Image: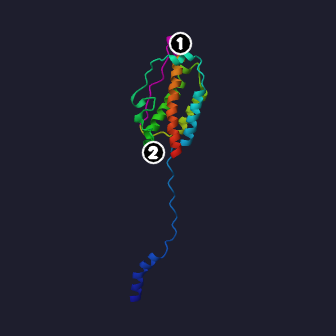
Amino acid sequence: MAPLRLLCLCLPALLLLLPAPPVAAAPAPAPAPGTDWAACKSLSQELSRLLGTLKEPHSELNRVQIAVEDPEGDCATRIRCSDACDPPTLDTNNTRCLRRILQGLQHYRDLLGSEIFKDNRLPQLVATLDRLLGVVQQAPGRPCQAPPGPTTPTWAEPLLPQLRHQALERLQSFTAVMSRVFTYSARTH
């Protein structure tokens, strides 16, 4: 009986000396879907290239400015300092920046489909904006509802070339900042 008791007491110690049996590895969790930064970089560069190739029919449009108010607050159509699109913040949390980029992309996509561009459609720009909207991941949070695109009364028809010109200039500025964000993020991710 004593040898059996000694064996019972020593068995756990002996089991600790034996190598552990192979355990089936737990399946790795599927990575959460993320933004394809390289595709965003490529598409934003394509958008910038397309905007650079547009020829305005009237050079005098550069000298005239029509006061058009940008929405302020959560629905602003430009990237601001408070949108956290600077490199240190992008490294830790890019949610606010992506939300602003999505809002801007959607705004300009809607604008290109509005009455302002009814006589001058730009299908390549629209297609590139659509592809970018498809690639950029929806950031969590409440989506912004931008105001509807402007309607054009008959008396304002002569102003449409100037409104188109200003919209394309603003899109070009937005695209330049957005491209910098995507270029930086593609390099670090």
Judge the density around disc 2: few (<14), some (14-19), many (≥20) Cα neighbours within 10 Å.
few
Residue 11 falls inside the magenta stretch: no
Q: Residue 11: x and y, percent?
A: 43, 80
Q: Is residue 105 left or right of residue 4?
A: right
Magenta residues, dominant SS class: loop
Position of the N terminus by quadrant: bottom left
Residue at x 51%, y 71% (from the top left corner)? 21
Residue at x 60%, y 22% (from the top left corner)? 55
**Label at residue 91:** 2
Determine which quarter of the picture holds residue 79: top left
- Mark 2 vs 1, N-terminal side: 2
Residue where numbered disc 1 is placed: 158
**Label at residue 12:** none
Q: How many marks?
A: 2
What amino acid is found at the position of numbered circle 1 in the picture? Pro
Residue at x 56%, y 31% (from the top left corner)? 48
Q: Residue 153: x and y, percent?
A: 49, 13
Q: Residue 174: x and y, percent?
A: 50, 30
Residue at x 41%, y 34% (from the top left corner)? 81
Q: Tell me: residue 107, above or below residue 84.
A: above
Residue 154 falls inside the magenta stretch: yes
Q: Which residues are magenta?
A: 142-159
Q: Tell me: residue 180, above or below residue 71.
A: below
What amino acid is found at the position of numbered circle 2 in the picture? Asp
